[in-house]
Image: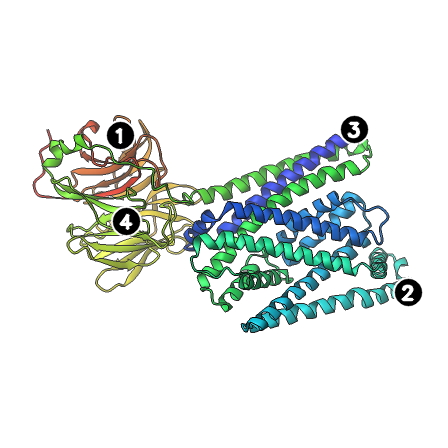
Amino acid sequence: MNDASLFDRRFFLRLLLSLAVSLLVLGTLVSAFTGQAGGGAWPRLLSVLSATSLLYVGLYALTGLIQAWLRGLRYGVILRTTEPAVPGNWHLFLVSMSRNMFVDMLPARLGELSYIAMLNRGYQVAAGACLSSLAISFVFDLVALALLLFLLLLGQLLLGSLQTWLIGSFLMVALLCLLLLVLLFPVATRVGRFLQESGAENLRLIGRAVAFLESTAATLARTRRAGIFGPVLLLSLGVRLVKYLGLYVLFLAVASPSFVGIDTRPAPVLAALVSAEASAALPVPAFMSFGTYEAGGALAMVALGAEKSASVLIMLALHLWSQVMDYSLGIAAFILFVFSAGRRRQAVARTSGRGRGRLLVSLLLLLVAAAALYGLFELRKVKKLGMLPPPSTEQGRLLPATARDRDPLLASLHGFIVWSSNRYGNHDIFMFTLPQKKLVRLTDNPHTEYFPRISPDGTRIVFCRSQEPWVSQRNYYAWDVYMLDLATGGERLIARDANTPTWSADGKRVFFQRNGNTFVSHDLATGREEVVYASGKNLPLASSVILETPSWSAARRQMAVTLRGTKRMTAVVGPGSAIHQVGGGCQLAWAPDSSYLYFVDHGGRGRNAIFRVDPETLSRTLWFDAEGEYSHEYFPKVANTGDFMVYGASTGGHEHDRADYEIFLWPVGRPAAAAVRISYFTGNDCWPDIFLTGARPRRP
């Protein structure tokens, strides 16, 4: 095998490894994101992230590149005191940029060792020189941090706003710097001299370790005598200043659009950023510094007068943006490092290594496949939570409703239809009266509202209101359930952290979903709540399985539900904890008299159709499939009288929050063509319900 072919093989192997690392890191970032922002914090965090200024994020990335270049220059200054052949500034920049990624990836700052591995294995720099330059750089990073803390203290003293916690942080970092300087130089030099005189390097078992320590100590001693501490300190200060400049810009990008009134002056912000960095720099085994970084920064912000929840959200969003950018730059730098290191190393042909090379290729391909699946799985979890930004307020327009207003069926009905619509910018609850054909806006709130359900007597509705101005309907969290009195317009909060409410048959209780995996019954008179079903508790399901749009039948003591977890399916639960699968699809619900179930599944003209299920045999039949262009059915709801059904339908769009669903009314048992279109709006209309009174028109 010639040198060129060997180089090509190694190039291919490194390319595979780089790809696998990239996919794994990106997947892990998304996983860390979902883990840190799960539950009710999701909507607020997503709102903050989506509102972040991308221009400022780009400026932060630019400061990251400058910071890595300064780090590379500092490494070069230190290495040139002991090494005859030091990689150029470009190569040291790549190592520095990659090191920035790895140092956060591994707990307790073990990622610092990536610097040694890359220089030693990639550029053949002596291990002792790598370790000594890393140690000196780490200490001077802390010295620069201590100097910045001292300047902040001095500034607070002059302004008369001294924070005592900053004194503790400065003293802790200063003492740590002093301890490390003593250990690195007087102690390390004496240890090296002792090892050299003792001849311990000749011992069989520990000889290599002793020799390495002796070499490192000698390198540290030569570095001290080289007189480079002044330039190293200046470069370290430059690294810190550029770093905090970038973080300050990123803080403005995150906080300014979403937190009106937050203090964005440089002094308090830098105090919080320095505190966060000091906490993250401690040898605490935190993955990607999540937790330690947020704790240090949020505590500092609270001490400076910021609100607690806002402080945590800002620091978490800032950390996530910084991780995304740092890892993107780090991955790119690492790939370039792999290529450049491969060109510097001399290829050695070994025929015997062919089999081993094939095995390595196979393992790397498996790693790439596993990493890709992992990353796609994590991204899919985020996508399932719905749109990050709200739909455009200018997307919809009202259309003429001539056909609806002339329809004789609507003129013969008495009652009303309610649904959620974003025709005024965000989703509010609307009512369409019959036979008057008058559209009335029931709610006017800056937060998102959906899933209205009418009480059995038709006097009230319950609905969901988001805890933040924008929450996707695909998100199971951060919703509250409210009740609206239709006669007075008065609203009443029923339950916090509640979603998709329904009524009991007697109107005395409201059922809802909580935390995605719990089905709760709420007594309206007493406010007492009772958990009916909960995944991982009284159901033989993992706690991560979602109980979506649960519907309760008091007559049968059963819950109709869509289960979302490792596998999506519709099912009937009960009596007890028995689970009876209906099939695929979603939005399984009971008829008003519990004589049948109905749900949405694939199989219609526009992909979707509505199916009817026998509760005894669980056999299903195609019940309704609309004709014409609006044949993607969704959100079905049978009237209290059982002889009409309202539903939403689009021409093909499926997304709950933005697709152009229109509301239709179908006389049950009539041909599909008898359905009447109720809404005429090109935005989003969804989740209708209907209440009817009086005599019913006869079916032909």
* Lower position in the chain sequence, tag 1 or tag 3: 3
Mark nearest the camera among 1 and 3 is 3
* Lower position in the chain sequence, tag 2 or tag 4: 2
Question: Image height check: is 149 above or below 409?
Answer: below
Amino acid bearing label 3: Ala
Question: Image height check: is 402 above or below 474?
Answer: above
Quickly name the residue at label 2. Answer: 198
Quickly name the residue at label 3. Answer: 4
At label 4, counting other C-alpha atoms closer than 10 Å, the crowd grade (few under 14, some 14-19, many 20 or more) is many
Image-based side of 374 in relation to 144, left or right: left
At label 3, counting other C-alpha atoms closer than 10 Å, the crowd grade (few under 14, some 14-19, many 20 or more) is few
Question: What's the residue at 88%, 59% (across, down)?
Answer: 201
Asked if residue 28 shows in the view, the reply is no
Quickly name the residue at label 1. Answer: 625
Image-based side of 212 in relation to 606, left or right: right
Question: What's the residue at 57%, 47% (across, down)?
Answer: 59
Quickly name the residue at label 4. Answer: 558
**Where does the image place residue 133, in percent across and percent down from the top left?**
77, 55
Residue at the limit of the structure toward the front, as seen here: 158
Distance from label 4 to label 1 (Cα)? 27 Å
Question: Image height check: is 602 above or below 451?
Answer: above
* Lower position in the chain sequence, tag 4 or tag 3: 3
Residue 316: assigned label: none
Quadrant location of the C terminus? top left
